[in-house]
Amino acid sequence: MVAELIADHRALESMVAQLRTTAAADLLERFCGFLTSHIRREENELFQEIQCTLPREELDRAGAEIGRRV
């Protein structure tokens, strides 16, 4: 699953690069749809798996690290 999500990120980056040079409505619509489905997949699958797999202490440390970086 992680490899697929990373591939999604690369595809999204490619679409953003295309949008910077060609502001086509159909490309923007595809980008928005793809981004929405990607985010839902991360929320519904990846994050759920992480919560079920990692111990609470690890989750707390990860959350603190994310908080420091924001």
Image (tube, rainbow, N blue to C red):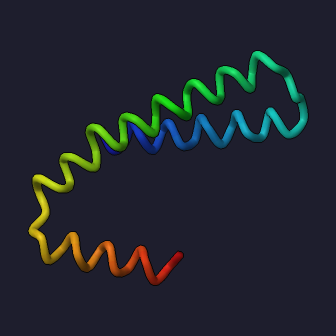
Residue 63 position, x and y percent, is 32, 73
Q: Position of residue 24 (x, y in %)?
A: 85, 22
Q: Residue at x 69, y 21 (%)?
A: 29
In the rendered structure, the answer to whether residue 67 lies left or right of residue 16 reads left
Which residue is located at x 89 percent, y 29 percent?
22
Is residue 63 depicted above or below 36 in this figure? below
Q: Does residue 33 lie above or below 17 as drawn?
A: above
Is residue 18 found left or right of 31 in the rendered image?
A: right
Left or right for 25, reference 13: right
Image quarter of residue 33 = top right
Q: Which percent across, then down, holds residue 64?
A: 34, 80
Horizontal placement of 69 versus 50: left or right? right
Front residue of 3/64: it is 64
| Residue at the farthest top position | 26
Does residue 68 sit above or below 59 in this rendering?
A: below
18 or 57: nearer the viewer? 57
Location of the N terminus (image quadrant): top left
Q: Residue at x 28, y 45 (%)?
A: 46
x and y percentages locating residue 14 in the rendered image:
69, 37
Q: How many marks?
A: 0
Q: Residue at x 81, y 34 (%)?
A: 19
Q: Is residue 52 above or below residue 59?
A: above
